[in-house]
Image: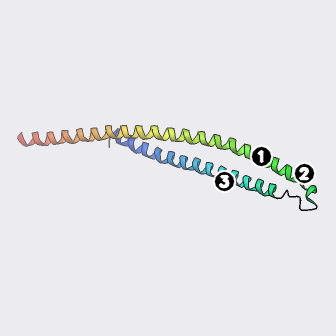
Amino acid sequence: MSETTDRVKRLNRILKVQAQKRLLEEWRIGQLREKSVALERADAEILGSLGVENALHGLFIGAKVANLRRNEVERQKLAGEEVVAQERLRQVRRVEKSLEKERDKSGRVANAEAEADQRDASIDAFLARWV
């Protein structure tokens, strides 16, 4: 095997790893979005329970406000983590794309070398018949 075919094989292995990293980052983003949706639902439940029909509703307003504030802090934290995860995903995609280009380039070089070797072997075989 030539050096360029080995290079193409190595690049294919690296691309598989990059694809797994991309899937992992996409999964992380999905998890962060699910947590954010869960916080939205929790906020909606808390706000829905703030009705005045209950005689004791005033006793729990402080706790509900604290929960809403805690959820807001968590939501901001999740938004920051999502921005970071989005940037990591962009970086992984960028690396993956550059590796694909390099692999394709190396593949073309390897194919050209293989064709040249085959052509040389054919010429040698043809000339060997005449000698």
Q: How many residues crowd mark 3 within 10 Å: few (<14), some (14–19), many (20+)?
A: few
* x and y percentages locating residue 21 in the rendered image: 55, 46
Q: Is residue 105 above or below residue 70?
A: above
Front residue of 59/55: it is 55
Give the residue drawn at x 90%, y 56%. 60
* x and y percentages locating residue 95 in the rendered image: 50, 38
Mark 1, residue position: 72
Q: Which mark is residue 34?
A: 3
Mark 2, residue position: 62
Q: Quadrant of residue 80?
A: top right
Q: How many residues crowd mark 1 within 10 Å: few (<14), some (14–19), many (20+)?
A: some
State if disc 2 and disc 1 touch (CB < 8 Å). no
Query: Which amino acid type corresponds to the residue marked 3 in the rendered image?
Result: Glu
At mark 1, the secondary structure is helix
> In the rendered view, does 105 fall on the left or right side of 31?
left
Front residue of 47/71: it is 47
Mark 3–mark 1 Cα distance, whole angstroms, equals: 15 Å
Query: Which amino acid type corresponds to the residue marked 2 in the rendered image?
Result: Gly
